[in-house]
Each structure stands twice: as structure tokens, then as C-alpha cells.
Image (spheres, grey):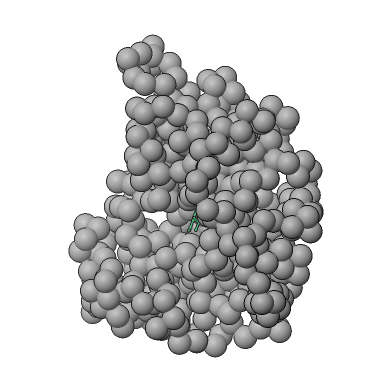
Amino acid sequence: MKYNFDKIYNRKNTGSLKWDMMENIFGKDDLIPLWVADMDFPVAEPIKKAIKKRADHPFYGYTQAKESLIEAVCHRLKNKFNWKINPNWIVFTPGVIPAINLAIRSLTSPGDRIILQEPCYHQFFPAIKNSGCQVVNNQLKLSDGRYKIDFHGLESLFHPELGHSPYYKPIKAMIFCNPHNPIGRVWDREEITQVGEIALENNLTVISDEIHGELLFNGNKHVSFATISPEFESNSITCISPSKTFNLPGLNISTTIIPNNKLRNEFIATQIGLSSPNLFAYTALEAAFRDGDEWLEEVLKYLHGNLKLLNEYIDKIDGVNIIKPDGTYLIWLDFRDLNMDGKTLKSFLENEAGIALEEGSLFGESGNGFMRMNIAVPRPLLEIALKNIGNALKE
Ligand SMILES: Cc1ncc(COP(=O)(O)O)c(C=O)c1O
């Protein structure tokens, strides 16, 4: 291994949300932070080198994406997801959540409805509500420890005869998260196809959040929504980003791929007035996509080792179960057998185990009794956290 991910770095006083905001958010600054999706691993060398090189050039003027960066994005999509895109489809955005906000505003009128599937990433809720729209939840179904899409539920949203009032405002889009945060499912081709067909039948645009698409366990394969068919491609807004894969969320960059000219023009018109990503973000994105794979392979191996460790520990702890993830480094832990309400569970884990996790109910009501754990941390730190949970529960 070229990188030493076991090393615990001191990230305090670096402006890190994960480490420096703990006091504000959890009321304590000495917890082991396993919450926000930010890895405690040092950045890939080629990215650091590229930023330093660019910083040495004494001009930091207005910036736009270089041809070589656009080529790097096209090449990555072809190489990783077998998606051949036209460079004109790319819109650079300052993050996936900003892109989803823009997408919703470009697709809707106030009051329109947007589908999401709870439990889901909590930032989807304000993205919908702050755009003046309403959330429609097509609840994921948990059976035998695995989440599935409720296709009947999805279809029934469009059929008044199945119990839906015709007076509701139209449903304009669906946020489809694949891999799905927080439950770690990588949806398979068949599931994606069913979602896409329901969307086409009902004039629904699919906003496909694929930010975790390169973070996969055990040979799972990410199928990008738009690659299923030209019809799906034309009915989609796909959000990809180096920020989870290469741990660059502080740089604020993502790429939004919009093949359909009308959808893209409306998205760009909504974006006018907002700043584009900054020059170091463009530099980092190109370096990550071109030269980041050695680091990424090592990270994926390391995460696999962390997942194994987590499984070993959790197996020995009564009352806690892991929802087996296909991908992402965010693990959905089921504490429901402990019969604690969400708030009590959260304060128990903070006060008795000394760890900061994300409370399940943040991801929707059905998340009550669950917690989301970020395992992208040095293994020695994860081991302390797991021992603490075991000891706290024994006591
Ligand atoms: C599914 C998903 N989408 C979007 C984001 C945030 O993306 P960004 O920081 O680029 O806005 C996250 C962060 O954890 C996420 O898990």
C-alpha cells in the first residue's frame, strides 16, 4: 500500500465540519466523529500535486473548464460506466445538492410534487421544500435485511383509482439515489429499468444522484440510469461528482449530465447568476479523474477491511444489526431490538459510547431506531468506537 490510512490525523482547527462543528451539533467536541460523509483519509497525491502546481501560477482569474477537463469527464464515464456522452451535455455545478436544487427548480412550478424514497439522504427534503414543492414518499421496503423498491407503491401514485386524489398537484420528478444513501443498496439493472419505465409512462423526469457510484463493495456493479436506453438518457438529469469518491467535498464541484437539450437549457437558465466551481476545484476534478485510481483502489480495499471489522464486532453485540451494504461507506445500523426511541439512542451512543453518528430519523420517519455510521476512518479509530459501543451496551 502506498498510502497509510491507519494514521489518525489531527483535523481540528482546520475548518473541518466533521471535527470542528461537533461542539455545535452534538454539544461535545471529544466524540469519535462517524457522522457526515467525509473520509478521514488524506487526499490522493496526484490531486494535491495538481493543486499545488496550479497555485504556483500567479493568476487566479475568472475560470472556465478546460478542454482537457471535459475530455477527462467523458473518458471517465465511458471507462467506468460504459456511458458515451456528448461533451455538450456536461454542466459544471458547485455540488450535487446545489445541482438537485437547480434541477427541481428548473422542472417544476410551485406546489408540484417530487418523489423520493425514504429512508433517503436528508438534504433531499429541503431541496424539494425550499423549491416550493411537496415531497411524495415512496417508502422503501425492508424485508429479510434488504431494502427493495415498492414498485406497486410507485405506480399507484399515478392512479387515482388506486386511492389517489386527482386534485393533487402533478408529480414532475423523482430523485433516484443510486447507490442509495443511507441504506447502501446498489440498484440492479432490472430495478433501474422498472423505475425508468414508470417515469416515462408518467412524464416524470428522473434526477439520478450517482455520487456514490464508484464506491462499491464485493464486485457490485454500478449501472448508470441513463445507460439503460436512449429514452432513459433523454429523460434524466444525472449528478456525478469526485467529492465522495475522492474525498473532496470542501472543493465544491460536481458534474451534471443532461443529454436532453430542452432540460439542459432550462437547467442552465435556472443556474444563471450562481457562481460556477472555482479554479482549484476544476484542477482537482481533472487530476482525480485522470490520476486518482491508484488511491481509489487502495481506499476501496481499506473500506472493505473496515466493513469486515464492523461485521465481526457487531456480530458479537446483541441488539444491533447491520443492513448489508452493496456500496458507499455509510452503514445503516439497525438498533430497533434495543427498543429505544431515536433521541434516547442518540444520546446513549454519544454519552455512553463517545461516538457521533447520524440519527436515523433524519432520513425519514422509518429511520427511527436506526443510525448511520461512516466507516471511512482509520481502522484503529473505528476499533475504539466499536469497542465503546460493545462496552456501553454490556453495561
Ligand atoms: C446521496 C448524496 N447526494 C449528495 C450529497 C452531497 O453532495 P455535494 O456535497 O456535492 O452537494 C451526498 C453527501 O453525502 C450524498 O450522500
Residue 295 in view here: no
- Give residue 344's quadrant in the image: bottom left
Which residue corresponds to the image point at 55% horizontal and 36% vertical from the top-left?
Answer: 269
At x 57%, y 58%, the residue is 277
Position above or below: 371 against 118: below
Q: Residue at x 51, y 67 (%)?
A: 250
Give the quadrant of residue 297: bottom right
Total number of numbered discs in the rendering: 0
As displayed, is residue 227 above or below residue 218?
above
Residue 288's spot in the image, x, y percent?
69, 66
Q: Position of residue 224 (x, y in %)?
A: 66, 44
Q: Is residue 84 left or right of residue 36?
A: right
Q: Percent from the top left, x then y, of residue 387?
A: 38, 81
Q: Nearer the viewer, residue 225 or 61?
A: 61
Is residue 143 placed above or below 21 in the rendered structure? Answer: above
Above or below for 20 versus 203: below
Q: Residue at left 28%, top 68%?
A: 25
> Quick one: 24 or 282, which is closer to the camera?
282
Quarter residue 56 falls in: bottom right
Give left or right: position of 105 versus 203. left
Image quarter (top left, top right, bottom left or bottom right) of the N terminus: bottom right
> Which quadrant is the C terminus positioned in?
bottom left
Residue 248 visible here: yes
Q: Position of residue 21 (x, y in %)?
A: 33, 73
Q: Is residue 393 left or right of residue 117?
A: left
